[in-house]
Amino acid sequence: MDKSWMSQPRWIQEYIDGVNSFLEFAFLRPSISGKILCPCSSFINRYFRSYEEVKDHLMIKEICRGYTVWNSHGEEKLIADTETELYPGCKLFSKLSFLLHLYRIKCLNSWTSKSFDILLELLIEALPDGSALPKNTYEVKKIIKASDLGYTKIHVCPNDC
Ligand SMILES: [Zn+2]
């Protein structure tokens, strides 16, 4: 995830685009009554605020410049998915890379979410203990959307899934 915008002055377009990408990232995750911790330079992840409020804070005050790993907003979880092997000892795929491959096949072949759920169920049963697959299409999408790695490519899916 590109964070070079975080060191830019807040009136520069790159900073404004960066704030939007941060909000998109943070609000993909479960929030508490639609609120997330506000990472602006005065609140520094101490108080929960709504989408509009966080956006205002980040535009008016600026983001806390030292907050480069967004661990209060789920980024650690994403890094963990990238580094988790698909199952203990698996050398070929990380959890995330496997999901990206799998989801791409689903899209290219227009599989329904229901059929994809069934495949996931089978894979979860078949993989060794300690494997790390999400249990349904919805969970897979959440993980993929959170990784801007896979999302831009997969988003060209003609079926909009
Ligand atoms: Zn704030």
Image (cartoon, grey):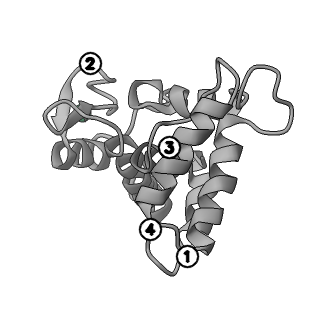
Q: Amino acid at mark 3?
A: Ile
Tag 4 near tag 2, CB within 8 Å: no
- Which secondary structure, mark 1? loop
The dot on residue 46 is 2
Bin the neighbour count of mark 1 within 10 Å (Cα to Cα): few under 14, some 14-19, many 20 and up.
few
**First in sequence: mark 1 or mark 4?**
1
Q: Nearer the viewer, mark 4 or mark 2?
A: 4
**Residue 35 point in image, percent of width and height:** 19, 35
Bin the neighbour count of mark 3 within 10 Å (Cα to Cα): few under 14, some 14-19, many 20 and up.
many
Say which residue label 4 marks. Answer: 161
Q: Nearer the viewer, mark 3 or mark 2?
A: 3
**First in sequence: mark 4 or mark 2?**
2
Say which residue label 1 marks. Answer: 156
Q: Is 157 left or right of 139, judged from the image as shown? A: right
Is disc 3's CB within 8 Å of ligand 1? no
Say which residue label 3 marks. Answer: 143
The dot on residue 119 is none
- Which secondary structure, mark 2? loop
